[in-house]
Structures are given as structure tokens and as C-alpha cells.
Amino acid sequence: MLGLWNLARSPLATTDDDPGALKRLLARDGSALLVAHVHDSIVGTAIAAWDGWRGHIYRLAVLPGYRRQGIGRRLVASGHERLRDLGATRVNAAVGESDPGPVSFWLAVGYERDPELARYSKNL
């Protein structure tokens, strides 16, 4: 999983992926981690997180050799299904605006850029 995220991560990603973070995710809500397999290999992932208020999709990643085959779309659709079942009526995805591939992907799967909101972050 960590290897896939390392290979497929956006150059704009700022949060380190490490075994401890993955263990915490799995311990807190393991069903949030969605995994795409081809044969016995993991080729894509997404985290469909629910905070009780809104849904969020993080770490959507597909290995470069498997992109443009619908894997990302299926991961997002599975995330939507999971979040809808939990009660979400809105889903957010953080997307680097200077990264044209992800921007066009999220627009293609029906997301809209919210011109009124900016994301503010702080590392703890």
C-alpha cells in the first residue's frame, strides 16, 4: 500500500505516508480504505472517510500502468456508495489545482470546483 502511494502520489501531496499512519487508519476505520486489485496485485486505492458531517475522499491513487482503465472511477463510485450508506450527502476531494491530470479526473466524475472555498492546513 505504502509503495503504491509512493509511486502514484501527486507531487503536491504534503502529508507523509508511513506504516504508523496506515495502522491508525485501519484500526480506526479499516472499511474506509478501498483497494483495487488486478490478479493478486494492488493497483489502486482510495480512502472514503466519513466524519459524521461530510464525506471525504483521500489518497485516490492508481499505478501509472493501470490508469485510464476505469479503476479510479470505480474506486470513487465505491467511495460514494460507502459514504452514502453512512449518511453523507456531500463529498469533498482535495485536489491540487496546478496538477492538470487530477483536476480533469475529478471534473469528469462530476465534482465541481468551489470558487468560494479555500483549504487551510496545518501540520501537527
Image (tube, helix red, strand yellow):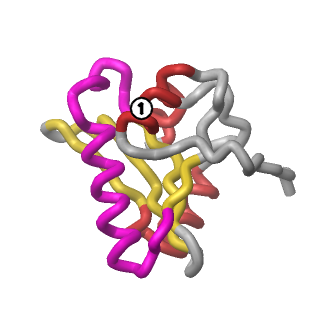
93 vs 6: above or below? below
Q: Position of residue 76 (x, y in %)?
A: 35, 50
Q: Which amino acid does the dot numbered 1 rest on?
A: Phe
Quadrant (top left/top right/bottom left/bottom right) for the N terminus: top left
Disc 1 crowd, CA 10 A, few/some/many (<14, 14-19, 20+): some
59 sits left or right of 75 in the view: right
| Residue picked out by circle 1 | 105
User: Which residue is at a point 45% across and 42% down the rendered structure image?
Assistant: 60
Up/down of 27 relative to 116, above or below: below
User: Is residue 114 one of those drawn in magenta?
Assistant: no
Magenta stretch: helix, strand or loop mostly: helix
Q: Position of residue 29 (x, y in %)?
A: 48, 73
Q: Identify which residue is drawn at 33% across, 77% down.
A: 85
48 in relation to 35, above or below: below
> Where residue 6 appears, x then y in whole percent?
54, 31
Number of labels in the image equals 1
Task: Name the residue: 26% across, 37% down.
Answer: 71
Residue range (magenta): 62-90
| Closer to the camera in the image, 124 or 112 | 112
